[in-house]
Amino acid sequence: MLIIPAIDLKDGACVRLRQGLMDDATVFSDDPVAMAAKWVEGGCRRLHLVDLNGAFEGKPVNGDVVTAIARAYPELPIQIGGGIRSLDTIEHYVRAGVSYVILGTKAVKEPEFVAEACRAFPGKVIVGLDAKDGFVATDGWAEVSTVQVIDLAKRFEADGVAAIVYTDIAKDGMMQGCNVEATAALANATRIPVIASGGIHNLGDIQSLLNARAPGIIGAITGRAIYEGTLDVAEAQALCDRAQASGTP
């Protein structure tokens, strides 16, 4: 399992939100490229970027920052979400050196677009499913749909989606632990690999994900915990590596 540091971009700065609320943002750095360097030097093997402005506006807003990070670390897998709603935007990010694009709102509202994107950019498309009480939320979490997360995930199985990033909105940014039960249930219900997101606070939360023994969980995104120092990226990755070496997912 990979420990994946999150860099959330708002107005060109690196921030963290609580439960997805744009007016409840903590600014951690005004230099996202330098922040990326910190996590790379800390041993991360993938980065998770989110264009928060883009998620709300429906188009990339912090694309220049994303490009700068991708060019600074051309060998590092980078995944980007927020405002990606066209093939042109995907192509822009892929050309910039981004490894994966994350489709969220567009995937929920137009599931057929996922298949189209996967055909055009095989192996590059991740679907972001954000949930509240098991139902998918969209538009920067401003709207909650009537679609169940597991049902939608199953729909994407035949499309060639590289992974699903699953976030429990109630947990995100609160540092009260990941929703391990729901994450494991999703991973066990679909053939698509799952990346856990939201609420990770410390090493115990990483251990809880490992203890779920769900082989489909391939990564865990962490944000506020690594910025506030309650979780160390290198230590957490070492725990995952030891678990893998011993035969645990």
Image (cartoon, helix red, strand yellow):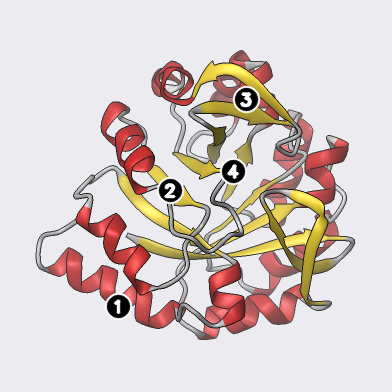
Disc nearer the start of the sequence (2/4): 4
214 vs 106, nearest the viewer: 214
Give me the C-alpha separation between circle 3 and circle 2.
Answer: 17 Å
Cα distance between the residues tagged 3 and 1: 34 Å
Q: Which mark is residue 195?
A: 2
User: How much space separates mark 4 and mark 3, taking CA atoms?
Assistant: 17 Å
Q: Quadrant of residue 7?
A: bottom right
Q: Which residue is mark 1?
A: 238
Locate the C terminus by quadrant: bottom left
Q: What residue did someone put label 4 on?
A: 169
7 or 177: nearer the viewer = 177
> How many marks overall?
4
Q: Name which residue type carries label 1.
A: Ala
**Could you tell me residue 93's position as x and y percent?**
71, 48
Q: Which mark lies nearer to you, 1 or 4?
A: 4
Q: CA distance from mark 2 to mark 4?
A: 15 Å
Q: Residues within 10 Å of mark 1 (few under 14, many from 20)?
A: some
- Whether the residues at callouts 4 and 3 have beta carbons within 8 Å, the answer is no
Kindly identify which residue carries mark 3. Answer: 107
Disc 4 secondary structure class: loop
The answer, for residue 239, to whether it is visible in the render is yes
* First in sequence: mark 3 vs mark 1: 3
Mark whose residue sits in front, 4 or 3: 4
Residues at marks 2 and 1 touching, judged by CB atoms closer than 8 Å: no
Relative to 197, does residue 128 appear above or below in the rendering?
Answer: above
Q: Is residue 135 above or below residue 206?
A: above
